[in-house]
Amino acid sequence: MKIIRKFVSFLPTLLTALVLAIIVWVSSVTASDPNQTITYKTPIKLEILGLNPDLVITYQEVQSVKVTLRAPRSVHARLANDPGLINATINLSGLEAGDHILIPEVLVDLKPVQVVEVSPASVEISLEKVSSRTMSISLVQTGTLPVGFQIRSARLSQSEVKLVGPESLVNTVVDVVATIDVSELTSSISRTLDLKPINEAGVVVEGVVLNPNRVDVSIEVEQLIGYRNVFV
């Protein structure tokens, strides 16, 4: 019992010594590797997580964020050499179509690190339903054949194309065209043409994916009776 009492009587002293030792150790470590608060100039690209495959992002306020971190000098040195250790994400899990304001999450694959600030602190994102439809392909011929020639036939390798994209954009498409200039044609040709989705104003609708996005065209050109080629 005397031994236990003696140990108990020394316990406050032992605890005090332990606390002092920890303080000295922490002070020593901090002095040799002090904490620093640094704002990283290189933006961190935002990674999108949890996007519903039936939705598409039609607006994203920013594509990257800047971060301010508090960490020991040695940690900052490693982050400067390998910025890929800093990750910024936005989680879209469970979100429906519409406008949303989300808070980016910054994770650092090193410890100890404290995220002091993320700029911007929130990001506005608009989601829209993915729509698809099938449309006929129109062959548009520009220019005029040389005198004495005419087009006998023009055939496309396929007559329809599938459009996929945000519902609001897909609905504005009134035609899908393949355009070819026939101004210099004096013989039959086969070419591959790009397809373009066009709205009522005749402007190409950006953000709509076409499948396929190209088509083969075969044009037969013949010379009219009573005309022949001569060299001048």
Image (spheres, rainbow, N blue to C red):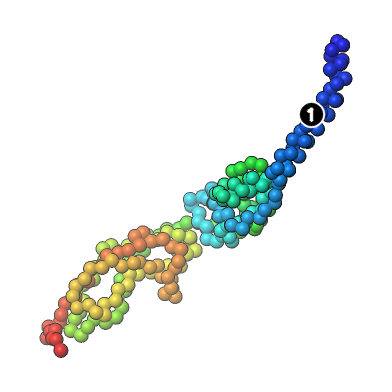
Q: Is residue 120 left or right of residue 230?
A: right
- Given the image, on which type of amino acid does mark 1 rest? Leu
Q: Is residue 83 left or right of residue 17?
A: left
Q: Is residue 15 above or below residue 228?
A: above
Which residue extends farthest bottom? 232
Q: Quadrant of the C terminus?
A: bottom left
Report the front residue among 96 and 21: 21
Residue positioned 40% across, 67% down in the render: 197
Which residue position is annotated with label 1? 18
Report the front residue among 221 and 25: 25
Residue positioned 66% across, 47% down in the render: 73
Q: Quadrant of the N terminus?
A: top right
Q: Is residue 9 above or below residue 131?
A: above
Which residue extends farthest top? 1
Residue 44 picture location, percent across and down: 58, 54
Residue 31 picture location, percent across and down: 73, 43
Is residue 61 in view from this perspective? yes
Q: Is residue 56 left or right of residue 191?
A: right
* Dot 1 alpha-carbon crowd within 10 angstroms: few under 14, some 14 to 19, many 20 or more: few
Residue 85 picture location, percent across and down: 57, 47
Is residue 107 in view from this perspective? no
Per the image, label 1 sits on a secondary structure element best described as helix
Residue positioned 81% across, 28% down in the render: 17
Residue 97 picture location, percent across and down: 55, 55
